[in-house]
Structure formats: C-alpha cells, structure tokens
Amino acid sequence: MRHFLGVAIAPEVMRRLIDAALHAPSVGFMQPWRIVRITCPRIRGRLHDSVERERLLTADALGERRESFMKLKVEGLRECAEVLVMALMEGREQYVFGRRTLPEMDLASVACAIQNMWLAARAEGIGMGWVSLFDPHEVAALLGMPTGATPVAILCFGHVEGFYDAPMLEKERWAKRRSVDECVFENRWPTADHQAEEAGSNSR
C-alpha cells in the first residue's frame, strides 16, 4: 500500500503485528531480524529524503521508462501512521546451520518475518507498504546500526480508505503477473533445446 489516511494505529495492534514478525520461521532458528520503530519526525523526514534521492537515481537508471516511473507513487512515508525499519542483525557469520552454502538464507528469513507482518496487517485491516528505494549504508548510519547490520526494508503502516484490487504496479501497467507456465518447471530448468525436444515428443 502507498496511500494512507494518517489515522493512528492502536498500540495493541502494532504489538500484534510485531509479534507476528517475531514468530516467523528462520533458518537454523537464527532469528536474524531486528526492528527499529521510527517515532522521531526528524528521522522519518531524513528517511524520506533518502528514499527520494534513490527514487531519482532509479528513474535515471531506467532510461526510456524514466518518465513513466516518475509518475508512480512509490511510498507513503509522509502519510502513514507508523514506520518500522526491518534489518539484518550483526554477527550473522557465526550461524552456520542452513547457511554454509546459502548464506543469503538470513535475508530469506527476514523476508519471512516481513511477510508474516504483512499478512497480520491485512487481517487487522491495516495497510502495509514495503519501501526498498534507499541507500542501505546511509540508513544504517542514520539509525546507528553496528557494523554488519543491514537495513532491508522501510515498512509503512496505516489505515487505508480501501485495499487495491490488484497490485498498484499491475494496475498502472508497469508489469504484469507471470503465468504458472513461466514460473513452474518440471524436473529441470527449461532451455531452448529442451523446449524444442519437449515440443517434438508431444507432437508424436
């Protein structure tokens, strides 16, 4: 969600949303998530400034799609009732269980916590938006994170007039939802040769 009413969220509701995040599954039960609640208007403003700088850099990087991108509303930091920054904790290298060959599973675990919070928010009738347009080093410094800790998401929460009936970027025709055939494969990753072979065997 990127459109919020600015109405306060009851403290007990926010506690339930955070509790949902803390009960997410994590690889090796490492629980790598750390959450910074932003209550200072000055810090929220500086977060918004960081997002705006990255929005402009992203627009420049998009080339011919720049103008279409600039018309999109990409965050609701100023209007939302609550802002949480979800981060990866420091010292993650000590956790080997489930991460020896896939160290990025710490990030996957944080994503599970964010998804838990998202589902809980929807069940509470609260909108949530995930903002990833920011420089992580800048945000880490702003929030005084220790070396090794990394911000992953700026999360916006708030009451909404209504939930979108489809993802906003789909409604704005920025991208379309991929089909099952594009995303689900059987036994192996399809290559051009393999697809031709499959087509030939199916025509016999």
Image (spheres, rainbow, N blue to C red):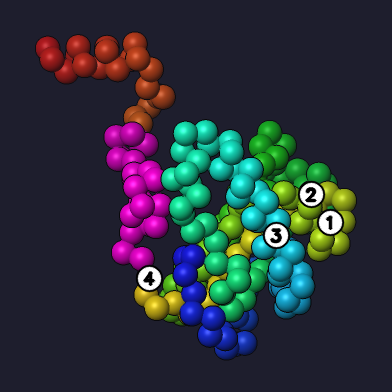
Kind of residue sitting beneath label 2:
His
Instruction: Report if residue 118 is visible in the image.
Output: no
Q: Position of residue 48 (x, y in %)?
A: 67, 63
Q: Is residue 47 magenta?
A: no
- State which tag comes first along the sequence, 1 or 3: 3
Q: Position of residue 204 (x, y in %)?
A: 12, 12
Task: Tell me the element at label 2.
Answer: helix
- Point out the stretch of residues depicted in magenta: 164-184
> Which residue bears the numbered disc 4?
163
> Which residue bears the numbered disc 3?
49
> Which residue bears the numbered disc 2?
137
Q: Name the mark on residue 141.
A: 1
Separation (CA) of disc 1 from disc 3: 14 Å
Kind of residue sitting beneath label 1:
Ala
Instruction: Report if residue 53 is visible in the image.
Output: yes
104 left or right of 187?
A: right
Kind of residue sitting beneath label 3:
Asp
Kind of residue sitting beneath label 4:
Phe
Separation (CA) of disc 4 from disc 1: 34 Å
Considering depth in this image, is 136 or 71 the residue closer to the camera?
71
